[in-house]
């Protein structure tokens, strides 16, 4: 007499085990960083991806904001911090002013920023484990009285 005993997992058990593994991997995933920063098309290969991204983003912001002077009185050079998001499809969008000096009119500056950053370009999105992800960035922006230079 030959007796054969086999243990097989049911499909339900396999599905549960796969879900547990996926959940564990997701919990271990660091969602505060990206593996590859978003990329502008003209990034220099000699720069790191983060350096190239920030350099190009700063140039884009500067070109948009330097085309006009703001019709508010600024007594001294100051700064604000703006938040930008690059979504999974690579679309850059302005979100809000994250921090701003108390004497600056945050609502007015935010409305100007909303207008200036309506049609930002599409770039290659950030990657996390090879998958396109949305990512947000805080960018400092210097505001100054008309007629002064950045080094004053």
Image (spheres, rainbow, N blue to C red):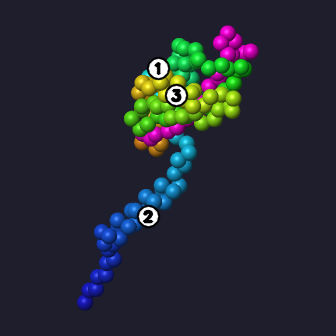
Magenta-colored stretch includes residue 133: yes
Pointer 2 and pointer 3: residues touching (CB < 8 Å)? no
Of badges 2 and 3, the one in the foreground is 3
- At 39% across and 62% down in the image, what residue appears? 18
- In the rendering, which numbered label is found on residue 42? 1
Work out whether residue 120 or residue 72 is closer to the camera in this orientation and state it: 72
- At 31% across and 78% down in the image, what residue appears? 6
- At 35% across and 67% down in the image, what residue appears? 14
- Label 1 sits on a secondary structure element that is loop
- Label 3 sits on a secondary structure element that is helix
- In the rendering, which numbered label is found on residue 20? 2
Pointer 2 and pointer 1: residues touching (CB < 8 Å)? no
Question: In the rendered view, does 42 fall on the left or right side of 71?
Answer: left
Q: CA distance from mark 1 to mark 3?
A: 30 Å
Pointer 1 and pointer 3: residues touching (CB < 8 Å)? no
State the quadrant of the C terminus. Answer: top right
Q: CA distance from mark 2 to mark 3?
A: 46 Å
Report the magenta residues as a range: 132-152
Work out whether residue 112 or residue 8 is closer to the camera in this orientation and state it: 112
Image x and y of residue 127, in percent: 46, 39
Image x and y of residue 75, in percent: 71, 19
> On screen, 51 above or below 62?
below
- Label 2 sits on a secondary structure element that is helix
Of badges 1 and 3, the one in the foreground is 3
Image x and y of residue 144, in percent: 67, 18
Q: Crowding near pointer 1: few (<14 within 10 Å), some, many (20+)? A: few
Residue at the right extreme, as displayed:
152
Task: Identify the residue position indicated by label 3 in the image.
Answer: 111
Q: Is residue 124 visible?
A: no
State the quadrant of the N terminus. Answer: bottom left
């Amino acid at each position: 007499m030959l007796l054969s005993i086999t243990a097989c997992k049911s499909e339900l058990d396999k599905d549960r085990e796969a879900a547990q593994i996926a959940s564990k991997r997701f919990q271990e995933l660091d969602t505060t960083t990206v593996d590859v920063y978003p990329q502008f098309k003209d990034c220099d290969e000699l720069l790191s991806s983060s350096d190239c991204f920030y350099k190009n983003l700063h140039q884009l912001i500067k070109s948009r904001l330097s085309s006009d002077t703001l019709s508010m009185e600024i007594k001294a050079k100051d700064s604000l911090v703006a938040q930008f998001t690059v979504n999974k499809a690579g679309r850059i969008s302005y979100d809000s002013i994250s921090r701003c000096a108390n004497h600056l009119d945050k609502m007015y500056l935010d409305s100007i920023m909303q207008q200036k950053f309506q049609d930002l370009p599409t770039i290659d999105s950030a990657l996390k484990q090879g998958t396109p992800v949305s990512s947000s960035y805080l960018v400092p922006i210097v505001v100054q009285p008309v007629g002064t230079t950045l080094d004053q």
